[in-house]
Amino acid sequence: MTPGMKLHLRAFLILFSLILGACHTSASPVLSPTPRMMQHTTRTVVKLSPTSTPSVEINTPTSTLINTIPAPTSTPIPITTLLFTGVIVPARCVQAVIDKYGEADYLYEEVRHIIQSADLAIGTFNATMSDFPPHTGCIPTYILVSSPTNADAIAGAGFDLMSVATNHIKDCGLANCGDRAFFDTLHHLKRVGVLPVGAGINHAEAMKPVVVSINGIRFGFVSLGQIQQGGVYAEADKPGIAMLSEENITAAIAAARKISDVVIFMPHWGPEDVAQPNWIQRNLAHKIVEAGADLVVGNHTHVVQGIQEIDGVMVFYGLGNFVFDQWQRDHQQGVILLVKFQGSQFIGYKLIPTHVDKDGRVHIADSEHLSLASKIKELLAVYKEHEAEISIGAYVPGANVDYDVAVQAREGISAFLEKRKPSWAKDKP
């Protein structure tokens, strides 16, 4: 090859290199695909209408592209389930069996799974827990004393909070007891991590709301008692329970509202053994709702009482007995109330009928005891147009239903009440 030919060849190679380099100046380096990159290899073709933007081809990890502009993701509002029971009275014959067994866990064996499945479980304790006064044994008496082991059983069953604004919270039976049994009760509940509400060292403490945060929602509880027995009412310098009065209703709910998203009012009210809420209860229920409560769950009467909706707020007047030794059929019946909130919005409730034996063992009501369920259903379904919405064992939507039928609750519930024996002492075990 002559020098001239070599010169032409060198010029050609330089020119070729320049052209080739120009073709690759914008090319990205070739990388091995990473796992994250491989997530975005699904190809989706979006075909738009001819009158809009032409078809666009986009790499997306999803198989179907709904919109080329990402929509903001919304977090579902969590649902919170609260559980309430009727009164818990592990005294007299129940305590006698507990003393025999040496433990009280047996009381809740068949319902423990239901209690523990709730986000928050609330009961009403209507006795004292103390080893200072003697246990009465299985005799007819109004002195309702139980042992501290009941606190451990209550916590083990899954309860988180306990209304103690009850008329037997100072029961002792000894002249020198003073307030010892009362303070023992509060101590033992706190010892096992169960929050008492409705009682304290003085009136101010008894009125304080208890607030529990679940799923980002602050549920505030207040509990006031209507039944004065043995000097149970707290005063400025006296321990006891918060008294159920119009003035205290307003003050307690206002205090709870300042620090709560949902206010739940738990009155201990009404005459014993009566399924129909009396006019005092019904008037107080209106006052409670007007003061700003979002839910009302009452107790005390030892029988299941009616249900009413007042201005969109559900009022459960009484849930019957959960644990007690009373032998009358209607006194052995109760309901577990499950209430659902989505965020702070009430969305429905469920009633689970229960039956309690004389030794205090709680059962889910079987076919023999379901007369209670059928009568509750009758009570709730008086307005036929809403009958389809209502069923025992299923959540009832918080519909705007007029439940003023609670005023005539006896007509719906009393059918299942059996004639009482003259004296329950005739049925001693």
Image (cartoon, helix red, strand yellow):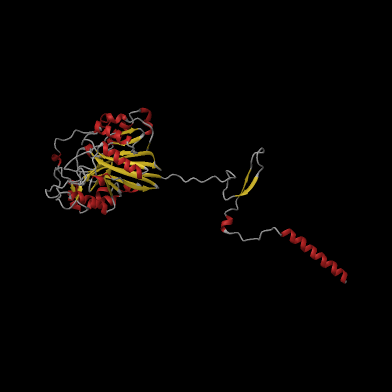
Image quadrant assignment for residue 140: top left
Q: Is residue 321 above or below residue 28?
A: above
Residue at the farthest left position: 175
Q: Nearer the viewer, residue 255 or 386?
A: 255
In the rendered view of the protein, which quadrant contains the N terminus? bottom right
Q: Position of residue 241 (x, y in %)?
A: 23, 44
Q: In screen coordinates, is 188 left or right of 172? A: right
Q: Is residue 75 above or below residue 305?
A: below
Q: Is residue 340 above or below residue 309?
A: below
Q: In screen coordinates, is 392 left or right of 358? A: right
Q: In screen coordinates, is 387 left or right of 59? A: left
In the rendered view of the protein, which quadrant contains the C terminus? top left
Q: Position of residue 77 (x, y in %)?
A: 44, 44
Q: Nearer the viewer, residue 45 or 249?
A: 249
Image quadrant assignment for residue 339: top left
Q: How many marks are shown on the rendered structure?
A: 0
Report whether residue 36 is seen. yes
Q: Position of residue 126 (x, y in %)?
A: 22, 44
Q: Position of residue 150 (x, y in %)?
A: 23, 50
Q: Nearer the viewer, residue 137 or 365?
A: 137
Report whether residue 85 is seen. no
Residue under the image location 22 percent in, 53 percent down: 149
Image quadrant assignment for residue 55: top right
Residue at the farthest top position: 384
